[in-house]
Image: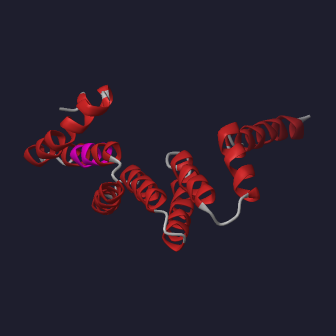
Amino acid sequence: MKTNKKIFPVITFIFILLNSYSQNPKIDSLISKLNKSSEDTIKAFLLAELAAQYHQNDPYKALNYGKEAIVLSKKIKYKKGEAMANGNMGLIYKSLGDYARATEYYFEAIRLYEETGVTRGVGIFLNNIGNIKKEQNRLDEALRYYIDAFPIAMHWKDSSMMANV
């Protein structure tokens, strides 16, 4: 009887632990599609999307997907995918507290989005850099990034981006 009292909490803990590591349907779906895709823009997109999905729950797995997305996007010359993957790498490093690396990836995403004419991406990552500067209490720098992002937010009617200014 004493053994059962000790085993029950252990079994309960293991059950809870296993359930907490179960994946969500979105990740399962992305992985399923990834396993069926060839080395093309769809695969690069899926890798970048997996990086975004994992960035809060498993940032180290997210980094792997993000790096893979960047490598593949460069290989197939898919600049939009490379931009998206760089932006996601910035999000991951920001969540890890590595603001310097996050900012580097955000700047690379901005450069690539400017090259491809995706102004909304430029605005999002200017805004994200502003958020980092604000968190670092570098408010004058933050304001400059927010001001640069604001016209883009207005153009796209992006209220979440506009709210930071």
- Residue 99 sits in which quadrant? bottom left
**Image quarter (top left, top right, bottom left or bottom right) of the N terminus:** top right
Total marks in image:
0
Q: Is residue 129 magenta?
A: yes
In front: 129, or 39? Answer: 39
> What is the basis of the colouring in this image?
secondary structure
Q: In this view, does 82 lie above or below 71?
A: above
Measured as percent of width and height from the top left, residue 6 is found at 81, 40
Image-based side of 5 in relation to 26, left or right: right
Image-based side of 56 in relation to 124, left or right: right
In front: 59, or 152? Answer: 152
In front: 2, or 122? Answer: 122
Measured as percent of width and height from the top left, residue 68 is found at 56, 66
- Residue 41 sits in which quadrant? bottom right
Image-based side of 113 in relation to 133, left or right: right
In front: 108, or 42? Answer: 42
**Residue that appears at 21% across and 45% down:** 130
Measured as percent of width and height from the top left, residue 45 is found at 56, 54
Magenta span: chief secondary structure: helix
**Residue that appears at 24% across and 30% down:** 154
Outermost right residue: 1
Outermost front residue: 117
Measured as percent of width and height from the top left, residue 28 is found at 72, 45
**Image quarter (top left, top right, bottom left or bottom right) of the C terminus:** top left
**Residue that appears at 70% across and 37% down:** 25
**Residue that appears at 28% across and 59% down:** 107
Outermost left residue: 140
Q: Is residue 19 above or below residue 80?
A: above
* Magenta-drawn segment: 124-130
Q: In this view, does 157 lie above or below 83?
A: above
